Amino acid sequence: MTLISAPQELVGVVGLEIHAQIHSNTKLFSGSQVGFQAPPNSLVSFFDASLPGTLPVLNRRCVEAAVMTGLALNCTINRKSLFDRKHYFYADLPAGYQITQQRLPIAVDGTLTYSHLGGRKRNTVVTKSVRIKQIQLEQDSGKSLHDDYRSQTLIDLNRAGVGLMELVMEPDMSCGEEAAAAVREMQLILQALGTCQGNMAEGQLRVDANVSVHRPGDPWGIRTEVKNINSARNLARAIDYEIQRQMFVLESGGTVQNETRSFDGKTGHTIPMRDKEGLQDYRFMPEPNLPPLMVYEACSTAPPGVAPSQVVVLEEVRERLPELPSVRRQRLVETYGILPEHSFTLVNEDGLMDYFEAVVRETKAGPRKVIGWVMNELQGLLHQQNLSVSQSPISPQALAQILNLQENGQISSSIAKQVFQELWKTPGKTAQQIVKEQDLGMVNDSTEIHRICQKVVDSHPDQVQAIRSGNKKVLNKLMGLVQKETKGRADPVLVRAVLEQKTS
């Protein structure tokens, strides 16, 4: 008898192409300035406008940025790379072609290690890696602004010719969450290097996702490409929707089309843009106006007589590599004794690590106590009100003051949280002012605490009898009643000692 195994479930396969705008003062092949909000067509040189007779001059800063990014992603840096022309007609591409690196890019065969929070409670750090196929230098295009009211398209060439790194990731991911985590890690690395500012809202980081589904062991399915996704959250939504859509098509007996789609953030759906069946012929050809791009291992290997300003040296770029996010997380764990999942959140949330370290420097409280406040109280209110760390009404110094008052025994832990809430509403005040105005300081008068404890004991004879019969847990209820009388201002250690004495 032949056993036929049930067909395996369909799974998603995801690869990414990331276009990162290089952080440089000028464009890739011209001296035009780079600026996001400049008036339309105010940052356009003759070369950017593709006037006859103009020639490209390669920007050294852009080459160094690509090399540094490649080193940070464990890539092999090609000592010789080539530029090519990729031909296609588009209104905001004046030359009718883009200068790119199709045959021999500047960096190949890298790895990006990324993490995301997994597990049932989403508090376990899951670490994965994705292969980087290549990093290539290329020009950005201009912008087409479609005016439906007047039925016309306006062209802004300010962005035309800005330097891009295209980072191509192999299809090693299986869902939106993994892809979003990989992009976030890439964004953090680029920002740490200073090679790209990584602001997705300003188009400095744009992501295309190649999505297909198949059964494990079978050949990959037909893929679709979802273009120009502008946030990590939308990337995850777009990919997960597209995986489910393709699964539904196949399970209904249909065929997935090889097409380009866009993502509608309002509906959460992907929409067809154009199909890829008539594959576009880009007519790639070597760029005749640019010689091979050479990168040298050390100054000693550079050709004699060439000015140092004209040479990119790997040794020098390697020495300038900063602390990368993965190293930063490890340092936080080792330095402060915090959990890996806490270090993950500190590094991944803009400004949170600096906030945490500033509080630690200013307070007597230990790092573990500080991390609890940052993760719970601060993050809770920031997320609730959709604020960034930089918009927090409570500065690191103000939080440190609250913790110092608690450490000095001037306020209890519950009062500290109350003071935090008050400071959030009235950021102009100090923690000391709020404690004084609302009389929130600790009740340290032993006689007063004895009096309140005696009052609670006298009015709850049943609970006292239960404690004397061995049920020590009831003592916590009496402690709560004492704290209610003192509005949370009594020292819990002293209260427990007094109640134990009076109920023994």
Image (cartoon, rainbow, N blue to C red):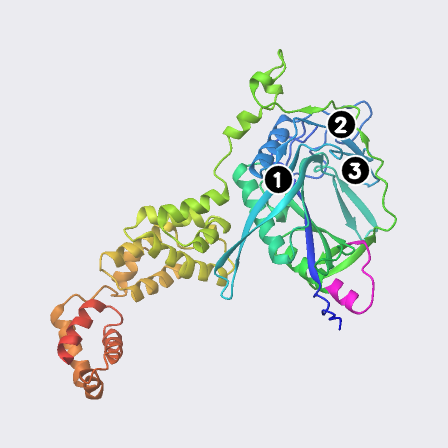
How many residues crowd mark 1 within 10 Å: few (<14), some (14–19), many (20+)? Answer: many
Q: Which residue is mark 2?
A: 46
Quick one: label 2 or label 3, which is nearer the N terminus? 2
Choose top left, top right, bottom left or bottom right for residue 407: bottom left
Instruction: Say which amino acid is labelled 1.
Output: Gly
Relative placement, left or right, of 462 versus 332 is left
Quick one: label 2 or label 1, which is nearer the N terminus? 2
Relative placement, left or right, of 131 versus 161 is left
Q: Nearer the viewer, mark 3 or mark 1?
A: 1
Note whether residue 137 is visible. Answer: yes
Q: Identify the residue at horizontal 19%, vertical 71% (top origin).
A: 495
Q: Is residue 293 above or below residue 110?
A: above
Magenta region, residue range = 245-260
Quarter holding the C terminus is: bottom left
> Which element carries disc 2, helix, strand or loop?
loop
How far from the left and from the top, in percent, is residue 465?
19, 87
Q: Identify the residue at horizontal 16%, vertical 85% (top origin).
A: 458
How far from the left and from the top, in percent, is residue 303?
63, 15
> Which element carries disc 1, helix, strand or loop?
strand
C-alpha gap between disc 3 and disc 1: 31 Å
Relative placement, left or right, of 183 versus 245 is left
> Which element carries disc 3, helix, strand or loop?
loop
Dots 3, 1 in contact, CB < 8 A:
no
Q: Which residue is mark 3?
A: 93
Note whether residue 428 is visible. Answer: no
Quick one: label 3 or label 1, which is nearer the N terminus? 3
Q: Which residue is mark 1?
A: 110
Direction right: furthest residue = 278
Instruction: Say which amino acid is labelled 3.
Output: Leu
How many residues crowd mark 3 within 10 Å: few (<14), some (14–19), many (20+)? Answer: many
